């Protein structure tokens, strides 16, 4: 086929041609702008995704891997433990004997030790009546048939036998001297031992001729010039009449200052040794007042097991059906003492609890029932992991470093499951629900990120969100009226020549670094305001009231005076009285303070006028020097210029034709401003408010410096707050990379991001609507 | 408190009084100089505008017609750095009287701008704006005003079914007539029109000219126009300005047919610049 002849284009005259340079520049700039715009969208999206990735691990449970099955002697072991390196577990047989197994396969450096034992250092006449195993602290406590107690502690130590960095874990047994706990030389049962620094406590049930008694003894060890003296019994206590029944279990917390006694009836008695050394009965409580089987109402359910989780502040009680609840020590203000209160209710296990193991790193615990295993975080009652293992579990253990779960089945196999749970204490409940923390009497939201392993970190987002809202609300409360009114004034009333001065000044203010504002607020403003709240209030409201009054007076003035003032200069007549009213308010405030807010000062031993004390004593509110009022003023300074400039711009941009149209119809300047300018500029003003709001919500330095950063959950103007952004700034130095706190701070950022994103989206929709509604003719 | 201006200036006409002839100096401009900052725009103007007649201001662009018009209701007050010498009186009272409230002056002088400027509100609200700012909000009065003003502005038939719709939905000519309706809603005494037809097609222009004829019965009208035919058609008297000076002023017929001044003649016959 013949190619279609191309139509000949008539030549274009030279002067109509577009030069290649113009075309090139045009295409280049179009391209650049497009690339720029798209990359901004991508960048924002990427930030969002990045924060999301940082936050996501917080909401994952524990990941437990495939088991490594190791063969160990097939005996009905009653307990086991393992070293931090998971190399040499020990097993406790029915007689209390210890069997160690070297799990490391032999290599060229050393031969496997295989299965080996270490002998206890037990006196020959010590005949064992019973023993207990404290898996958390690797202790085996023996009680003899004649009332003596012997505590053995298993220690592991890495050794380097061949030098050259070859590590071998060497177990050893440290035995305490034999202690005569029993007084009648009878067999002991349920022996329990605790040690807190120098303080030690032993407790056991002794079977006397008249029935069971509980023997309790404190142990002391004197420090002598030649080292520590022998371990001796300090104080002895016996519970005989105090007992309700034969104890079914004893528990001594690590603090070594109290004893919990459980009875078959399901009751628990709590005894505490006070500072004077007296043993007092504090309370009796029933962990399971309801029977597990609802068909048989009436009596309480017996306790199958009771165990502490790390920190020994919370006891977990199990019944035979698999229900388990937590009770923790709480300081009760009204009783002025600590006692146990019901704190947790966990999802019941499918059957009776066979095993229980506590983490040494956090407040999680592992329970099994049949072949069902479950890892639970005590603090939030959240299940971190659970599974049906497919074999009946004889013993279970959380590895000391919280990096594996170990299960011993009934056929002599040890299942070592590697576990990855980097943020065990994190989760939805941790961040967003009320939690009953140890030591606290009720369910609360709280933030307190530091503390040791046995301390419950409080990471609730709720007080931070409330704090953020509080800071923002107070800032906007002060900023919005001032900024909008001054924007209206400057754009509609002020002399154009003066406006040329005011506008740039405000713009400079907008660029003032917030650290300077924060510094001033924290160092200078906060003591000033806090010591003179009535004065500050009266001055502030005085200025507003004074201005309104002045307006009234002004409109009643004879025309001769009124009209002799050049238009746009009227502010002088408000400014001077306003200053006077502010001054008057300040001094009147002091008079009012000395008159209405008289409070007795214990230091000065006389009545003084103190609003601060009045708030605390009469209103019963807290009062902090760095409080929301200070923040309101300081943040006002940060936010006012922004709202002012943007809304002033949008009001000045209202077509002059509208204004003159309105004025020519006999409207006053105020009517023009309110009826024509404000609605027409509504979209811009709305943007100004949103940008101001965004600034307030994200403002950090002022919040850090002008508030005490205390975690406050009310809108009391006299307390500070901790905002999401300030929280990030304050805690960032504490946060270890990729740790729980680190990611939690990202969660703060995420919430802030979602907050502003949602707000801005809603605002944008509203703004578009306003714009359509009051669109000016183009 | 009473405003002497309010009492005396716009007193109701005595019954049967022949207004146009009785008040040939209803608006007086006396030795009037006007400055935007340093620049003088109006020079030594002396001019009497009679009651209930149409007076046209003509002259080349930039000669100060709008400036003078805007001074009659003191709209130039909005501009920074203005200054004037001489005086303007309306019915014998100076508009620069320190006792005078500018708002009440403007309430009685309607103004139609060169570019139509309806507010971003409904047609209805545009018309009743001057009543609302005067604090009058009786529904029946507002309704009555809307109908009367729109009828006067020959717009009623076109918009009576869409009074609540935005004024921006109107055509350019309709908008201009809406602005006229708005300006006369509060029954002012004087109506200032700054090139009201500059953006309109001949049909709309015709309607507005017709309107001016009718409005003359009620208002004293000052109109600025570049359209000589229009000036000749609608006005009773014509003032010709050149470079801020009043060159010629008289009966329209005389100014157009028999100008005394060379420049006027050149301008009205279209031979000018
Ligand atoms: N706001 C102002 N500031 C300074 N000078 C002004 C201002 N408004 C107008 N002028 C100047 O005053 C002179 C008269 O302007 P004016 O608008 O009165 O002219 P005009 O006769 O209405 O012209 P046109 O027919 O083009 O509307 C012009 O030279 C103009 O540049
Ligand atoms: Mg003009």
Image (cartoon, rainbow, N blue to C red):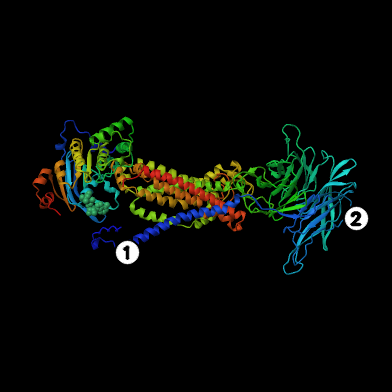
Mark 2 surroundings: few (<14), some (14-19) or many (≥20) residues within 10 A? few
Question: Can you give x and y, in whole percent of width and height, for residue B136 in the image?
Answer: 32, 34
Left or right relative to A454: residue A28:
left
Q: How many marks?
A: 2
Left or right relative to A499: residue A605:
right
Indicate whether B17 appears above or below A443.
Answer: above
Left or right relative to B129: residue A35:
right
Q: Which mark is residue A21?
A: 1
* Residue A531 seen from this side: no
Indicate whether B138 appears above or below B121.
Answer: above
Q: Which quadrant of the structure image shows residue B27?
A: top left
Indicate whether A89 appears above or below A347.
Answer: below
Q: Are marks 1 and 2 on the same chain?
A: yes
Question: Can you give x and y, in whole percent of width and height, for residue A242 in the image?
Answer: 82, 40
Q: Which quadrant of the structure image shows residue B111?
A: top left
Of residues A695 and A305, which is closer to you in this image?
A: A305
Left or right relative to A592: residue A765:
left
Residue sticking out furthest to the front: A1
Q: Which mark is residue A124?
A: 2
Badge 2 sits on which subunit?
A
Badge 1 sits on which subunit?
A
């Amino acid at each position: 086929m013949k190619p279609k002849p191309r139509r000949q284009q008539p030549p274009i005259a030279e002067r109509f041609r577009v030069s290649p340079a113009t075309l090139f520049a045009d295409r280049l700039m179009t391209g650049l702008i497009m690339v720029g715009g798209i990359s901004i969208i991508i960048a924002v999206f990427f930030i969002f995704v990045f924060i999301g990735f940082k936050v996501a691990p917080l909401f994952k449970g524990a990941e437990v891997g495939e088991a490594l099955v190791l063969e160990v002697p097939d005996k009905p072991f009653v307990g086991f433990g393992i070293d931090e390196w998971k190399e040499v577990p020990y097993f406790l047989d029915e007689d209390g004997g210890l069997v160690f197994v070297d799990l490391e396969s032999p290599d060229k450096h050393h031969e496997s030790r295989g299965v080996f034992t270490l002998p206890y250092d037990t006196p020959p006449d010590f005949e064992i009546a019973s023993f207990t195993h404290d898996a958390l602290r690797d202790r085996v406590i023996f009680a003899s048939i004649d009332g003596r107690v012997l505590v053995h502690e298993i220690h592991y130590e890495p050794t380097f036998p061949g030098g050259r960095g070859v590590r071998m874990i060497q177990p050893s047994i440290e035995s305490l001297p034999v202690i005569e706990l029993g007084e009648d030389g009878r067999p002991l049962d349920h022996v329990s031992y605790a040690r807190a620094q120098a303080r030690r406590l032993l407790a056991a049930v002794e079977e006397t001729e008249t029935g069971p008694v509980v023997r309790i003894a404190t142990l002391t060890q004197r420090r002598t010039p030649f080292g520590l003296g022998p371990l001796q019994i300090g104080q002895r206590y016996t519970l005989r009449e105090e007992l309700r029944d034969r104890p079914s279990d004893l528990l001594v917390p690590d603090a070594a200052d109290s004893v919990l006694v459980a009875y078959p009836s399901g009751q628990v008695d709590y005894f505490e040794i006070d500072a004077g050394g007296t043993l007092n009965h504090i309370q009796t409580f029933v962990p399971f007042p309801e029977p597990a089987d609802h068909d048989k109402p009436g009596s309480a359910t017996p306790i199958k097991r009771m165990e502490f989780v790390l920190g020994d502040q919370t006891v977990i009680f199990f019944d035979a059906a698999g229900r388990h609840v937590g009770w923790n020590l709480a300081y009760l203000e009204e009783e002025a003492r600590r006692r146990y209160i019901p704190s947790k209710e966990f999802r019941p296990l499918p059957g009776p609890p066979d095993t229980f193991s506590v983490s040494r790193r956090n407040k999680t615990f592992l329970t099994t029932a049949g072949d069902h295993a479950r890892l639970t975080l005590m603090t939030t009652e959240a299940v971190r992991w659970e599974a049906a293992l497919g074999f009946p579990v004889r013993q279970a253990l959380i590895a000391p470093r919280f990096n594996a779960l170990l299960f011993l089945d009934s056929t002599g196999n040890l299942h070592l499951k590697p576990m990855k749970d980097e943020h065990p204490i994190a989760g939805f409940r941790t961040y967003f629900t009320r939690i009953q923390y140890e030591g606290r009497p009720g369910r609360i939201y709280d933030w307190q990120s530091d503390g040791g392993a046995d301390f419950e970190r409080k990471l609730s987002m709720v007080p931070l969100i409330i704090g953020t809202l509080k800071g923002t609300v107070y800032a906007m409360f002060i900023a919005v009226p001032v900024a909008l009114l001054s924007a209206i004034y400057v754009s509609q009333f002020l002399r154009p020549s003066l406006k040329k001065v005011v506008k740039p000044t405000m713009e400079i203010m907008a660029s003032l670094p917030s650290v300077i504002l924060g510094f001033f607020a924290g160092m200078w403003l906060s003591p000033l305001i806090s010591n003179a709240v009535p004065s500050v209030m009266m001055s502030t409201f005085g200025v507003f009231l004074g201005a309104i009054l002045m307006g009234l007076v002004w409109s009643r003035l004879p025309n001769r005076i009124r009209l002799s003032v050049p238009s746009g200069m009227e502010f002088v007549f408000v400014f001077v009285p306003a200053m006077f009213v502010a001054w008057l308010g300040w001094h009147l405030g002091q008079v009012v303070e000395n008159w209405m807010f008289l409070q007795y000062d214990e230091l000065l031993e006389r009545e003084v006028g103190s609003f601060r004390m009045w708030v605390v004593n009469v209103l019963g509110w807290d009062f902090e020097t760095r409080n929301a009022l200070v923040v309101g003023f300081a943040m006002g300074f940060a936010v006012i210029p922004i709202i002012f400039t943007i809304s002033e711009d949008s009001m000045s941009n209202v077509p002059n034709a509208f204004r003159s149209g309105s004025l020519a119809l006999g409207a006053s300047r105020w009517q023009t401003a309110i009826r024509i300018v404000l609605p027409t500029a509504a979209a811009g003003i709305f943007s100004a408010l949103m940008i101001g709001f965004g600034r307030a919500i994200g403002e950090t330095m002022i919040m850090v410096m002008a508030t005490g950063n205390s975690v406050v959950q009310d809108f009391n103007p006299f307390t500070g707050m901790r905002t999401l952004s300030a929280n990030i700034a304050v805690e960032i130095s504490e946060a270890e990379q990729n740790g729980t706190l680190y990611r939690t701070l990202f969660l703060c950022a995420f919430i802030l991001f979602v907050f502003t994103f949602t707000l801005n989206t809603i605002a944008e929709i509203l703004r578009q609507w306003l714009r359509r509604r009051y669109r000016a003719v183009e | 408190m009473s405003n002497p201006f309010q009492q005396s200036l716009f007193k109701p006409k005595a019954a049967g009084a022949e207004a146009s002839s009785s008040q040939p100096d209803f608006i007086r401009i006396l030795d009037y100089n006007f400055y935007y900052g340093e620049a003088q725009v109006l020079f030594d103007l002396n001019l009497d505008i009679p009651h209930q007649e149409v007076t046209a201001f003509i002259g080349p662009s930039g000669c100060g017609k709008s400036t003078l018009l805007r001074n009659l209701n003191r709209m130039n007050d909005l501009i920074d750095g203005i200054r004037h010498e001489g005086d303007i009186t309306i019915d014998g009272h100076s508009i620069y009287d320190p006792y005078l409230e500018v708002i009440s002056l403007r309430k009685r002088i309607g103004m139609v701008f060169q570019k139509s400027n309806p507010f971003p509100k409904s047609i209805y609200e545009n018309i009743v704006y001057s009543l609302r700012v005067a604090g009058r909000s009786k529904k029946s009065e507002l309704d009555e005003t809307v109908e009367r003003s729109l009828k006067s502005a020959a717009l009623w038939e076109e918009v009576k079914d869409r009074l609540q719709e935005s004024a921006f939905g109107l055509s350019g000519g309709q908008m201009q007539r809406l602005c006229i309706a708005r300006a006369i809603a509060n029954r002012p005494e004087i109506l200032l029109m700054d090139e009201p037809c500059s953006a309109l097609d001949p049909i709309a222009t015709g309607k507005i000219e017709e309107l001016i004829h009718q409005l003359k019965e009620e208002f004293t009208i000052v109109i600025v126009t570049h359209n000589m035919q229009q000036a000749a058609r609608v006005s009773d008297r014509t003032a010709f300005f050149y470079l801020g000076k009043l060159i010629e002023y008289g009966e329209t017929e005389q100014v157009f047919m028999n100008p005394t001044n060379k420049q006027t003649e050149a301008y009205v016959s279209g031979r000018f610049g």
